[in-house]
Structures are given as structure tokens and as C-alpha cells.
Amino acid sequence: MTQTDTRQLVEEIDRLKREKRAVILGHNYQIPEVQDIVDYLGDSLELSRIAAGTDAEVIVFCGVHFMAETAKLLSPEKTVLLPDKDAGCPMADMVDPEALRKFKQEHPGAPVVAYVNTSAATKAESDICCTSANAVEIVQSLDAEEVIFIPDHHLAGWVQEHTETRMIAWQGYCPTHIRISPQAISQAKDKYPDAAVIVHPETPAEVRKLADAVLSTGGMVRYARETDAKDIILGTEYGMAYRLQNENPDKTFYTIQAAVCPNMKKITLPKVAEALQKMQYPIEIPEDIAARARGTVERMLQASG
Ligand code: 13P
Ligand code: SF4
């Protein structure tokens, strides 16, 4: 796309946004051109709070399917559009309601904590939701001896390091974050010995051990702002560096190039424009599922400070 094409597309998106009374939300891993046009950029927790509070009539969600679904759960009367209907999260697809029901029978009495990276149907079978920003806080809020944690066993492992509650972990994982190896982090540390290392809790334990901080993507934004370190190695999806570099021009961010989430990259400017023109692709959740899944997400928002 030429610069003129991009400028025209951005103007068209802006016009459509006003015409449809829409707000555009984007996750921190979105491609740069999309990050540049969103009204709000954030992590899963921040974006779900914005979705719950907006007075726009339409929410265009630049992210993956479970994020748009969560926005729809919290703003059921609004039209929520996902500009690419195939932008999913493979980790969210690693558990489904039927398999979860069976797992619950094997562990009777243990409450189910569902990472927000799950479908609405799976959330409907769960007791409370969490994100990477509040997982420890949510598990502790339950005051239970043991909890079933789905679907990410690396995040469950991270929570286990911070709580007495026994974590019964579903064996899912993020295909993007498991591509970050301890060797890659060590090599980056050898190259930039003064750098701070920050990683996402979806990374494996051997990677987290090498980090100065384990953070949600929103936590990374705050950390980068506040740290005195001038070099920062990022153990998360590489798109995160764009926002961090923009907001902290005096610091340098180093990414692990193998860590790409292809689904996050599916949203493009032409697809955002088309989403607003054709009002596609609206998120629909059957009401019996939505009512139960909404409770799971709302319990998280109530329990999380
Ligand atoms: P955050 O909530 O930390 O932004 O993470 C979402 C996600 O999908 C990470 O892979
Ligand atoms: Fe899912 Fe991993 Fe992509 Fe996040 S980075 S959306 S967990 S596949």
C-alpha cells in the first residue's frame, strides 16, 4: 500500500467511525498501522473494562475472537465486530465445554478459573475468569484449597509459584510464547548485559526464571515507562515492541523474532474499513451461554482491584 492509500483508508475509517458511532479497540500485539488508528490500545483486562464502559454503539475489536466475545458479553446491547472472522486463539481452542465437564467430574468440588483466553461456551462452564494481569489475585480471592485452571498450564505454573492453592492445570499452552526459549533470552542477555528482561506469564518456567519481571502486556507498558533500564529484552509476542518503542523513544527494546502470533496479525486497515462498511463480522452468543459466561467475567471484574 502506498502512503496515499494508507492516508485515504485512515480517513475513510475515521469517517465511518463517526457515522456508525463506533469505537475501535486494539490489543497490544496488533500490527503498527492498526495500533496507530485505534481509540484504545491495551491488554485483555484493560480492553474488557473499556468495552464494559463505552457509550459507543459499535465496538470494532482489533484482536482475536475470545477478546471480541468478552466485549460482547460485557456490552450485550452493542454491536461488536471482529474484522477477520478467522482471527482465533489456538490456546483458547485447546479446551471445550464437553472436555471441561469431564475434567470437573474428575476433580469434584474444585472451582474452575478460566483464563480469558477461552470461548464464551467454555466460560459458561467455569466459575470465574482471569487475565494474565490478575490471575494470582483471582485464584487467591477464591479461598479454595485447590482450583481447576484452564487452559494455559504455563500461566497456571506461574500462579502456583505465588499461591498456596493447589493448581489443577489443564495442559494447554500458547504456541507463540512457547517459541521463546531460555537460550534465546540468554543470548540476548549476553549481547545486552545491562538490559532488563520482561516476559509474559505464558512463557515456560525456564524462561520466566531468567526474567526481572513477569507481566501482562499492560504491565509491560507500565514497567517500560518506570524502569531506569535503557535496554529491555521482551519475552512476548514481538508486536509489543512497537507501542513500547513509540512511548519510550529513549529506550531500546529487543524482541524474540520467533514469537509471532499469526492470528493477531490478521487484522489490517482494509479489513477494519470493510468491517465498518459492511458491519462484519458481528459476534453472536446464544443467550443461555451468554448469561452464564457473563457471570464468569463479571465475577472477575468484581474481584479484581
Ligand atoms: P494480555 O492480557 O497480557 O495482553 O495477554 C493476552 C494474550 O493473548 C497474550 O498472549
Ligand atoms: Fe492466543 Fe498466544 Fe496469540 Fe495470545 S499470543 S492470542 S495466547 S495464540
Image (cartoon, rainbow, N blue to C red):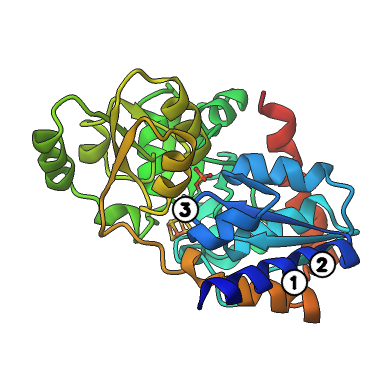
Position of the C terminus by quadrant? top right
Residue 31 against residue 204 in the figure, above or below = below
Question: Between 217 and 116, which is closer to the camera in this rendering?
Answer: 217
- Could you say where residue 135 lies in the image, as x and y percent from the top left? 52, 34
In the picture of the structure, the residue carrying the numbered disc 1 is 12
| Residue 241 can be seen in this image | yes
Indicate the quadrant where residue 111 lies.
top right
Q: Residue at x 55, y 39 (%)?
A: 110
> Is residue 192 rendered to the left or right of residue 91?
left
Mark 3 to mark 1 CA distance (whole Å) = 39 Å
Location of residue 108 with respect to 274 vertically, above or below: above
Q: Disc number at residue 15? A: 2
Mark 3 and ligand 2: say if the CB distance to the nearest ligand atom is below 8 Å.
no
The answer to whether residue 243 is above or below residue 4 is above
Residue at (42, 29) in percent of width and height: 224
Depth check, mark 2 against mark 3: the one in front is 2
Give residue 197's quadrant in the image: top left
| Residue in the picture at 50% in, 67% down | 93
In front here: 109 or 123? 123
Q: Earlier in the sequence, mark 2 or mark 3?
A: 2
For the residues bearing labels 1 and 2, Cβ distance under 8 angstroms:
yes
Instruction: Tell me residue 16's x, y (percent).
Output: 82, 69
Q: Going by the image, does 275 lie left or right of 87? A: right
> CA separation, marks 2 and 3?
40 Å
Determine whether the beta carbon of the residue marked 1 sits less than 8 angstroms from the nearest atom of ligand 2: no
Q: Circle 3 — which element?
A: loop
Q: Amino acid at mark 1?
A: Glu
Which quadrant of the render holds ligand 2?
Answer: bottom left
Q: Amino acid at mark 3?
A: Pro
Residue indicated by mark 3: 151
Q: Quadrant of residue 298?
A: top right
Of 104 and 43, which appears nearest the observer?
Answer: 43
